[in-house]
Image: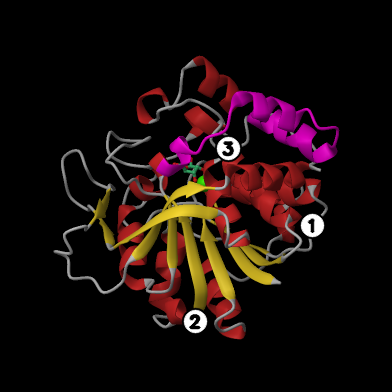
Amino acid sequence: KKKLILDVDTGVDDAQGIMLALAAPNVEILGITCSHGNTPLENVLKNTLRVLKVCGRLDIPVYRGSSDPVLARKKHAGDYHGVDGLGDVPDGDAPGLELLQKEKAAQAMVKIVKQNPGEVTLVAMAPLTNLAIAVQLDPSLPKKLKALYIMGGNTQSRGNTTSCGEFNFVTDPEAAYIVLDRYTCPTYIAAWEFTCKNCLPWSFHDQWLSHKSEKAAFMKKISNYSVEKARSEGYQKETTEGQGFNACDAYAVAAAVDDTLITEKEEVAVSVELGGNYTRGMMVLDYMELLKKQHKVTIMKKIDLEKFKQMLIRAVK
Ligand code: BDR
Ligand code: CA
């Protein structure tokens, strides 16, 4: 089985990513590490446990990560995911935080990877703070990883949070910089424009969530808020050729779960802008190789959408 660690800031698409991984028969989730991001850390912890509860998988260890970016000011995405990160639908029955592991996220990453050298794939769906801290704790961590999948960054200077910046990178640019600099393991990036270009028709979305199961009902309930927003405000209009359902984080998870999912890709060295009046947090693609970086990442360009749909369907069954 593939061994995964998921790093999340559980909002709606993180929930989709987690559920997709849980439903994959070839995957073992060794731990879920939580980060500030879509919503403050305390909500992320609760949301992650809520998702695991619906899937009957509260046995998976969940770790408390960083509540703040490395240097930047905190920023959340309540206007899209709802203030609580999961569409602001009350849940009187949410699991309590006493279920969390005592160990902190970055320490747990280091420990789990050390115990399974060369076997762990890390999937990052949040600001990269926990990963940046983990590599400071253990600089040899990337060498021991099998691969790293990141949902984040942008490839054509199209943002979703600032004009040029994608949320996960903009929220903690220093962490993104550290990660792209030090994680020299095979790295795959599902950037914002890629997710927009590979979005799915709303008709698929509606059919998907009309499935009769507790998981589908949960997903429908928590995504009402963001789906309404996406549809009514023409979200993504300026950033994509087509409009549709964008399960951002789930793309990174799906690619980690199935090596054959990516059908078109590109290899290039990347970094992150840390200054700039308009561009702080923007991913920089060094096609001219001026940065003299040895390490190139794989930028995802196209995936097998039929396979992806099947994985999403399996996630709510
Ligand atoms: C990313 O930002 C968050 O709001 C989403 O969960 C996703 O990880 C998309 O830019
Ligand atoms: Ca996320």
Range covered by the magenta-colored residues? 194-223
Q: Which residue is mark 1?
A: 57
Residue 11 in view here: no
**Residue 210 within the magenta-colored segment of the rendering:** yes
Tell me if residue 70 comes above or below residue 143 in the rendering: above
The N terminus lies in quadrant: bottom right
Label 2 belongs to which residue? 144
Other-residue count near label 3 (Cα within 10 Å), few / some / many at <14 / 14–19 / ≥20? many
- Amino acid type assigned to the residue bearing label 3 in the image: Gly
Residue shown at 62% from the left, 30% from the top? 87
Relative side of 130 to 278, left or right: right
Mark 1 nearby-residue class (10 Å; few <14, some 14–19, many ≥20): few
Q: Nearer the viewer, residue 294 or 45?
A: 294
Residue 67 drawn in magenta: no
Q: Earlier in the sequence, mark 1 or mark 3?
A: 1
Residue 85's label in the rendered image is 3
Decide: few, some or many residues near mark 2? Use Cα within 10 Å; few <14, some 14-19, many ≥20.
some
Q: Earlier in the sequence, mark 1 or mark 2?
A: 1
Which three-letter amino acid code belongs to the residue tagged 1?
Arg
Label 1 secondary element: loop
Q: Position of residue 219 (x, y in %)?
A: 71, 35
Give the secondary structure at mark 2. helix
Quadrant of the rendered image containing residue 224:
top right
Mark 2 and mark 3 lie on one chain; the one further toward the N terminus is 3
Q: State yes or no: discs 1 and 2 in contact (Cβ < 8 Å).
A: no
> Pointer 1 and pointer 3: residues touching (CB < 8 Å)?
no
The C terminus, quarter of image: top right
What distance separates the C-alpha of mark 2 from that of mark 3?
33 Å
Disc 3 element: loop
Foreground disc of the pair 2, 3: 2
Q: Is residue 213 visible?
A: yes
Who's the residue at 78% across and 27% down the image? 210
